[in-house]
Image (cartoon, helix red, strand yellow):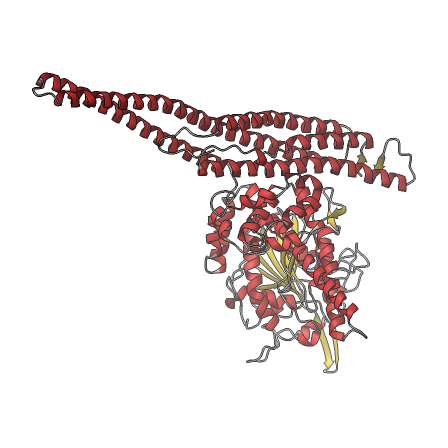
Amino acid sequence: MTELAISADDAEDACARLTRVGDAVALDLRAFSPDPGAPGPRDAVEQWLGWVAMRSGVLAGRVQGSGRAAADAAGLLTDTDQHLGRATAGMQVAV
Amino acid sequence: MTDWDEQHPGRGDTAGMDALIARVLEHVHTLDQSADELRAVTERLTSTWRGAGADAWAVENTGAEGELRAFRQQLYDGLDVANQYNEAVRLIAARTVTIEGDLDQARYAESMAQAALDELRALDDPDSWEVSRARSRVDLAQEDAVYATRQLAQLVFERQQADTYLTSSLGAGLPTGWGGGGGFGALTAALPAVAFSRGPEGLAVWIAGLPDGAEGDAALRWLVENLSDAQFEALLAAHPEVASRLMGGPDGAFAERFPALATALDVGGPDARIAAVIDACAGLSAHDLVVIARCYPGVVGNLDGVPLTTRIAANRVAISADLAASRAGLAAMEDLLAEEPGEPAPMQLTLLAGFRASVARCEDLLYGEVAVVGNGGGFTTGRHQVVVFDAAAGRFGELVGDPAAPNIAVVLGGTGTGVSNMSGQYDRALDLVAGVPEHSLAIITYLGGSMPPTLDMATRSRYAMDIAPHLASFANGVKAVTGATITVAGHSYGGSVVGRAEVEGMVVDRILHIESAGSGPGVDSVQDYAAPETPRYSMTAPGDPIGMIQGLSAGGTDLGHGMDPDILDGVVRLETGRVNARDPHSPVLSGSDAHSGVFGDDTKRNVKPDAWDNILAVMTGGEVTVWTAPTVESTVPWDVEVTYPMSDPTFVPPTQVVR
């Protein structure tokens, strides 16, 4: 038997903090690409900034998705706990 | 800004580059802080959050933290390149100014010297020494100009070098196929980076913006490679149609990134190909194996020689693609029926039912929970582990148990087995896996194609002939890639398939015929098999109707399944014993019920016959009980009394250690 436990408040706090982390991780500078003064370098910088935007976006989504996952887990356990008619204070469910 | 040229090799927006570098450098620090914050949040929540979900969440965040730090380093490396480039351009620009001054000065000096020389030459009687000095001044000024010009040319060369350095160094940090002519990175120019923060729907928006064709496919594969397991699962769950686009065959990008595997695909002969695939996969990192499962599921999901865990991951994508296709087919059929007046035609109803069944089956394989043997040996729930999935060909294989088990059995069902009822094969396999110490045995329920749907078709050998090559390659691949002790067992018609696969080149550690239809179409002796010395076992309970077709064949037709495996030289016939192996007073397992009764009674899980013990002993290398022939007494031909030794509670059958 595994004891499952999660604090809904802690999970919501984690979700909020990871949302902020995700916002900070994303970096899209594609609109501000400087001109190095030659076609090859110009393309290279643009492609690199494009990759930075996409890669940082993916990572931001990953971090924020993790925050939502924690909040969802707390929500699921809360629902289960309430369904079982238990007190919700500690949010503890044994399965 | 105008591009640089041979007269102005120092052109470039170095101030703009400085600003960019400063902004990205600031972000490098932000990424450090973000990684630290992610770790802190993880540690804080998991200090109170308990359970498997918490463990998985912590693992995911640890992975994300590692990726953040890796990305931080990639940014820093890129900045280093950009900074070196910018400094080089700045220096070239400064030196260009100096050289331009030198050149201007030299040219002015030359013009002055030339004028003086011309003036001297214009005299009636110029002093030759003075003319010589004036000419020398002209020559010196020209040399200075040439020198300055050479220096400018040197700067042009240095600028070219700097451009090449920037282009190649920044490009080297990009994913394969991202940059350069025809790179898919250009496709992302208009795609919003924030889409990724909107969960599967945002990802779907991003994907929907990709054009058809190789570049769009490459961009999609880049995306799915960069998703976490949870993100990828969520994407496929919300948009299984994405999987359809990943199902293509090996393309140029595949060959470029996985050249050894691409070469292995073209190797002729299944065993040589399996060896090449194993070699190629051994050279791949754990991340690469994840990538090929996600990005090329259609290539590796059913590729023999690929690690089982990679096949399982790849086939989740393949099943998602089938789910999308089945849902689309169902929706189209429902729309059609809604528009048509009157009752649907029988064929339409059949198609409708087929789509519905396929949708339900795929959903179960992807999201359904099945019973598995847990770490304590008891039952818990887990996910399906599909190692073969080809809906069009009706091929399916599911691993029950631990992929790293030292013993793996491949088990084939009999007549009527199909993709729609493989859950029954799963339950039977799970029962066996749970009957031995945990992690010691895994079973793959295998369906290599169409099996005879009804008993009247079961005498036909063509099903066995068609499936056998696939089984041979599959089993050989499992043996080679896992290194486990492999038993291939066939129940009923499945026994004929197993026998024929041996003819087709299947070489495993043990063969087991269970109430088998025959030793394989065309088999008269073990010499017909690829490896005659392979240990073989067979069991047929007394009175099982299968005995009526064992050994029957009609030359020149597809009727029959070769010799009766019970009497084939070199095959050890096993005791099927009593209904309850633990109760010597229980009846002998016999009659038509014994055909499947060798696996025990579904309603009495704790009651297993001797046959079941023997099946497990063969699969795990234990000790088997050997068949003892009954005594037959007859005074007249129509009154025959057969007495089976196992009907005597005191009888103890002889035993033999499994080879």
Say which quarter of the image contains residue B378: top right
Q: Position of residue B649 (x, y in %)?
A: 77, 60
Q: Is residue B29 positioned above or below B317 on the image?
A: above
Q: Confirm whether residue A75 shows in the render.
A: yes
Which residue is rendered at x = 53% and y = 27% of the image? B21
Which percent across, then down, holds residue B299?
55, 55
Left or right side of B87 for B588: right
| Residue B598 at least partly seen | no
- Name the residue located 58 percent from the left edge and 36 percent from the top edge: A31
Please state the horizontal and vertical placement of residue B278, each as a whole percent of the image.
51, 50
* Quadrant where the C terminus of chain B is found in the figure: bottom right
Note whether B327 is above or below B369 in the view shown: below
Task: Looking at the picture, tell me which residue is in the foreground, B189 or B363.
Answer: B189
Q: Residue furthest left?
A: B125
Q: How many marks?
A: 0
Q: Look at the picture and state if A81 lies above or below B354.
A: above
Q: Residue at x 78, y 73 (%)?
A: B344
Based on the displayed image, in which of its 4 quarters is residue B194 positioned?
top right
| Residue at the image point whose x is 76% and y is 46% from the top | B380
- Position in image of residue B393 (x %, y %): 62, 65
B165 and B515: which one is in front?
B165
Near-viewer residue (A7 or B82): B82
* Front residue of B228 and B498: B228
